Amino acid sequence: MTRKRQAGASAQRLWAPWRLAYIAGARSKKKKSGCLFCEKGKSKANTRSLVILHGRHGYCMLNLFPYNNGHTLVTPYRHVANLEDLTQEEWLDLWRLSKEAIRRLRKVLSPQGFNVGINLGRAAGAGIPRHLHLHVVPRWVGDTNFMPLLTDTRVISQSLDSAHRLLTRA
């Protein structure tokens, strides 16, 4: 005789309390003043700011709402939305910073690959369309699973504090 389980009695729980800030922000009708990237660009490389590296024309920071462990954003200091509006020096510095972010991510997290890209405009998926930024997302074979498909949930295996500490030291 098989025994029926009570619904949810032995379900696994995935605790992700940091997601509440994202959910609350998405529901909030209040617009925050200023630009997140302009403000973060003035911050020192520390855990609170999530900034891991400063360059001459831009900087790298961990994504507060990552797609994957180590998801890094690379952005110019200057408030610019369009790729074609970057100066040659800004463009080169963003790629130099991206290269350094990848070097650090390889050293610290040992990913098997990377997604590197730019979403230009809201229609292309840019969450902050008025300030251009590159995404550097470490990837591992098998890092995709059923969670995003069935539950719209991503499992991130490392805290932002831990990743920040390791990447700033690398």
Image (cartoon, grey):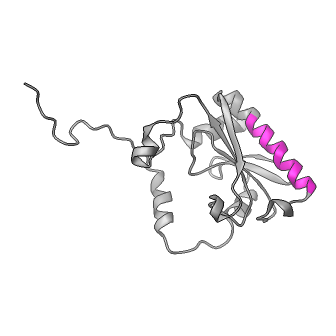
48 in relation to 127, above or below: above
- Residue 165 place in picture, x, y as percent: 64, 38
Residue 17 horizontal side relative to residue 121, left or right: left
Extreme residue in the left direction = 1
- Residue 10 place in picture, x, y as percent: 24, 35
Query: Is 89 part of what is drawn in magenta?
Result: yes
Where the N terminus falls, by quadrant?
top left
The residue under the point 92% across, 53% down is 89
129 in relation to 62, above or below: below
Given residues 75 and 43, the one toward you in this image is: 75
Q: How many marks?
A: 0
Given residues 59 and 120, the one toward you in this image is: 120
The residue under the point 56% across, 51% down is 65
* Image quadrant assignment for residue 167: top right
Q: Which residues are magenta?
A: 88-102
The residue under the point 43% across, 41% down is 147
Query: Is 123 part of what is drawn in magenta?
Result: no
* Image quadrant assignment for residue 141: top right
Residue 40 horizontal side relative to residue 157, left or right: right
Given residues 16 and 119, the one toward you in this image is: 119
Where the C terminus falls, by quadrant?
top right
The residue under the point 79% across, 65% down is 80
Extreme residue in the right direction = 88
- Residue 64 place in picture, x, y as percent: 58, 51
Query: Is there any visible trace of residue 165 in the rendered image?
Result: yes
Given residues 2 and 159, the one toward you in this image is: 2
- Residue 111 place in picture, x, y as percent: 64, 29
Query: Is there any visible trace of residue 51 in the rendered image?
Result: no
Which SS type dominates the magenta stretch? helix
